[in-house]
Image: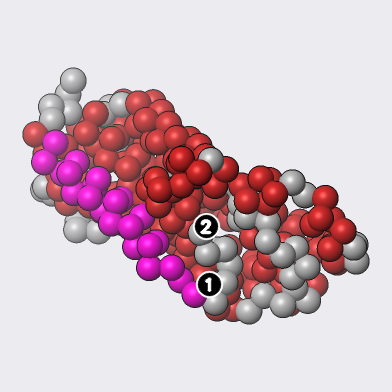
Amino acid sequence: MLTTVFTKTLRDQRRSLLGWSIGIAGTVALMAAIWPSFADMDIDAMMAEYPEDLKEAFNITDLSTGVGYLNAELFSFMIPIMFIVFAVGRGGRLVAGEEEDGTLETLATLPLTRTRVLLEKAAALVVGIGVLTIVLWASLVLGSAVVDMGIGPLEALNGALAMFCFGLEFGLIALAVSAGTGRRALAVGVTSAVAGLSYLLFLMGRLVDAFEPYLVLSPFHQALSEGPLGPDLPPIMATMVATGLVALVASVPVFHHRDLAT
């Protein structure tokens, strides 16, 4: 009984996880397949033609290496957005989706506390994001080995862990709003707006001097400031985990006292 909610939630998201895993692996494979032809170009001349603002905004530092190439072409936008969409969609649905479908009220009648229900759903969300993280890491390692991109397992792991923390923060925020309001659309909308504003702050902080002091507040900066593919894992990434956990903990008493029948 204690694992019913957790295992059921994992089972319910298995098809979604499979689809997203294929999407992430396919995206990495596509970018890796482009690398050999890209590496044959005159990288120095290409870099000279990039506007400085563009290089700053999209983390374009050294396109002559596999790490620099994927940091700019894959991790500056594409992979973070994929993790956000998955995490926010799942987080917004786990409580509010079932409540709107009329199944959560029945679940609440089981001999489990609401806190236990919410935490088991959160655990299932974390596992789901973790699965995509493993798929991302394996795809990076395999893609690098096949086309000789020179990306080591540790560099790939750091990049994958950055995306795990990134997805975890927004996923738990979406789950917290979902549990606190019982409205799936509101949970997804609010969290998506937070993500959008975070990305805007990230861009403005890199392009406009007046916004630079606030850059540290953006999860995009927290996840991407050091690559994220690279030899080190920035300590600032712990901020994303802490923010997500704080949002989840704050939602527990609200969810506990809400009338699920309304």
Where, quadrant-wise, is the N terminus in this rendering?
bottom left
- Is 247 covered by the magenta stretch? yes
Nearest-to-viewer mark from 2 and 1: 2
Q: Which residues are magenta?
A: 232-254
Locate residue 260: give its quadrant: top left
Q: Are marks 2 and 1 in contact (CB under 8 Å)?
A: no
Residue drawn at (28%, 56%), measured in percent from left and top? 242
Label 1: state its secondary structure.
helix
Label 2: state its secondary structure.
helix
- Is 147 covered by the magenta stretch? no
Above or below, comparing residue 248 to residue 178 in the picture: below
Could you tell me how far apart the alpha carbons at marks 2 and 1 are, in whole angstroms? 14 Å
Which kind of residue does numbered mark 1 sit on?
Leu
Q: Nearer the viewer, residue 141 or 195?
A: 195
Q: Is residue 22 left or right of residue 176?
A: right
Residue 141 % position (x, y): 65, 73
Locate residue 250: give its quadrant: top left
Where, quadrant-wise, is the C terminus in this rendering?
top left
Which kind of residue does numbered mark 2 sit on?
Leu
Which residue position holds label 1? 157
Residue 177 % position (x, y): 28, 35
Residue drawn at (36%, 55%), measured in percent from left and top? 240
Q: Which mark is residue 94?
A: none
Q: Spot the residue most to the front.
A: 209
Locate residue 107: give its quadrant: top left
Q: Nearer the viewer, residue 109 or 251?
A: 251
Magenta segment, prevailing SS (helix, strand or loop): helix
Q: Which mark is residue 224?
A: 2
Residue drawn at (37%, 42%), measured in percent from left and top? 91
Q: Is residue 42 left or right of residue 183?
A: right
Residue 48 % position (x, y): 81, 55
Residue drawn at (14%, 36%), measured in percent from left and top? 254
